[in-house]
Image: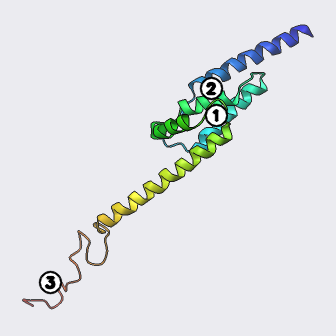
Amino acid sequence: MRQKYQGSTKVNRAQLQALRKKFEILNMRIGEFIDEYFSRTLSIANKMASHGDTITQSTIVEKILCSLTSRFNYVVCSIEESNDTTTMTVDQLQSSLLVQEQRMKHQRYEQEQILKVSNGGRGSGGRGESSYARGRGRGRCHGGRGS
């Protein structure tokens, strides 16, 4: 019985070490959304806790803040300046980052709309405006000059 228990603790320790390594090298991927990144991070943290590791909220908060993509740099700075990250919960951080992500999406959408308007519909293939078509004229074969 003792050998069986010792074997399972060794396996448990090995799994915990692997999870710690995964947690250490974890970074947000380019193009990944905040919800997805939090889900991946919390999944690893929960597995670590189930293997007996005591991982605090502040450890998770610090990890997330340090491993976000560069598009969140200014957000991280403002969060660190305005909040005590040692007492901040993961939920508070997630809400704050989600709001910022929504703002970024909205700004990107507005910029795309401005670009579409400023291009004036060039290349849209609209009525008589296509770069390949000749427009709405009668053309050569339909009773134009010289027929």
Q: Residue drawn at (48%, 50%), measured in percent from left and top? A: 104
* Callout 3: SS: loop
List the residue tagged with mark 2: 23
Asked whether the residues under the numbered discs 2 and 1 touch, taking CB atoms below 8 Å apart as contact, a structural biologist would say yes
Three-letter code, disc 1: Thr
Q: Is residue 57 left or right of residue 99?
A: right
| Label 2: which secondary element | helix
Hey, what amino acid is under mark 3?
Answer: Arg
Local crowd size for mark 3, using a 10 Å CA cut-off: few (<14), some (14–19), many (≥20): few
| Residue shown at 15% from the left, 91% from the top | 143
Which residue is found at the position 39% from the left and 57% from the top? 111
Check the picture and name the quadrant holding the N terminus. Answer: top right
Q: Residue 67's spot in the image, x, y percent?
A: 53, 31
Q: Is residue 75 above or below residue 52?
A: below
Residue ID at (29%, 68%): 120
- x%, y% of residue 63? 59, 29
| Marked residue nearer the N-terminal end (2 or 1) | 2
Residue at numbered disc 3 = 140
Rendering quarter of residue 61: top right
Quadrant housing residue 82: top right
Disc 2 marks which amino acid?
Answer: Phe
Real-space Cα distance between discs 2 and 3?
Answer: 71 Å
Residue occupied by mark 1: 41
Q: Tell me where residue 126 appears, x and y as whole percent.
A: 31, 74
User: Which quarter of the figure has residue 139?
Assistant: bottom left
